[in-house]
Image (tube, helix red, strand yellow):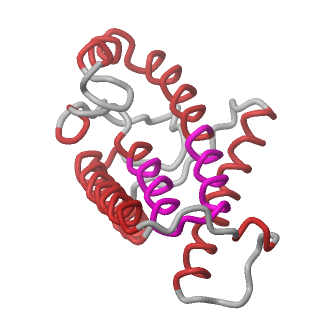
Amino acid sequence: MCLGIGRALVLYAHGGRVVVIDWQRSPVQMLADLLLFTCLLLWGYEVVAYAWPLRTHLVPAPLGTGLIDAVAAKVVGLVATLSGLLIYGLALRAFGASWRLGIDRAAPGSLVTDGIFAWTRNPIYVALDLLAIGTFLVMGRLLFLALGLIIVAMLHGQIRREERFLVEAYSDAYREYCARVGRYARWR
């Protein structure tokens, strides 16, 4: 999160548009965006609440039930989390000034296909997926499994919506890129 906020502040300081509201969203898409944002905030708070540990949790106690507590799962979770952070950082670097929160229909920037984008068309979403999965494996709680499943599903929906926009904005260039690089990984 600090990487994203830092990148946003740098872009904003240089006159870049950072947060863009897509007014062409349907009411269902707006509701989905609100649900995703709420889940991400809840996930972030609960990670901190369990890590410190804080006494106040925002979810019912049964969701705090531990499901796994194996060292191997925690190691895999740590690797997934660190991989997610690395991929996120590489994505921010490769995006350059094209990075936005939201679909920028007025000034979409250039199509980024190099760096980490040569390996996955959606590195930020892959990173968030890895963070959600890694958090569940490290924490082992039902809450993080439930939030992880919701977040992964909601991010996939966001990817599909962005893909429709990218086809409109970049047409053949984006289609050629899709033929070379998979949605989640280079390998098909």
Left or right, residue 51 beside residue 143? left
Q: Nearer the viewer, residue 48 or 112?
A: 48
Which residue is most to the left?
115
- Magenta span contains residue 135: yes
Q: Quadrant of the C terminus?
A: top left
Residue 117, compared with residue 44, is above or below; it is above
Which residue is most to the top?
172
Q: Which residues are magenta?
A: 127-153
Which residue is most to the front?
70
Displayed quadrant of residue 178: top left
Name the residue: 50% across, 68% down.
Answer: 69
In percent of width and height, residue 174 lies at 34, 18
Q: Quadrant of the N terminus?
A: bottom left
In percent of width and height, residue 140 lies at 54, 65
Left or right, residue 82 beside residue 132? left
- Magenta span contains residue 164: no
Q: Nearer the viewer, residue 17 or 78?
A: 78
Task: Identify the main secondary structure in magenta.
Answer: helix
In percent of width and height, residue 84 lies at 34, 55
Name the residue: 44% across, 66% down.
Answer: 70
In percent of width and height, residue 32 lies at 72, 41
Left or right, residue 26 beside residue 95? right
Residue 100, compared with residue 62, is above or below; it is above
How many marks overall? 0
Name the residue: 28% across, 12% down.
Answer: 179
Displayed quadrant of residue 155: top right
Residue 55, compared with residue 113, is above or below; it is below
Q: Nearer the viewer, residue 123 or 51?
A: 51
Name the residue: 55% across, 42% down.
Answer: 152
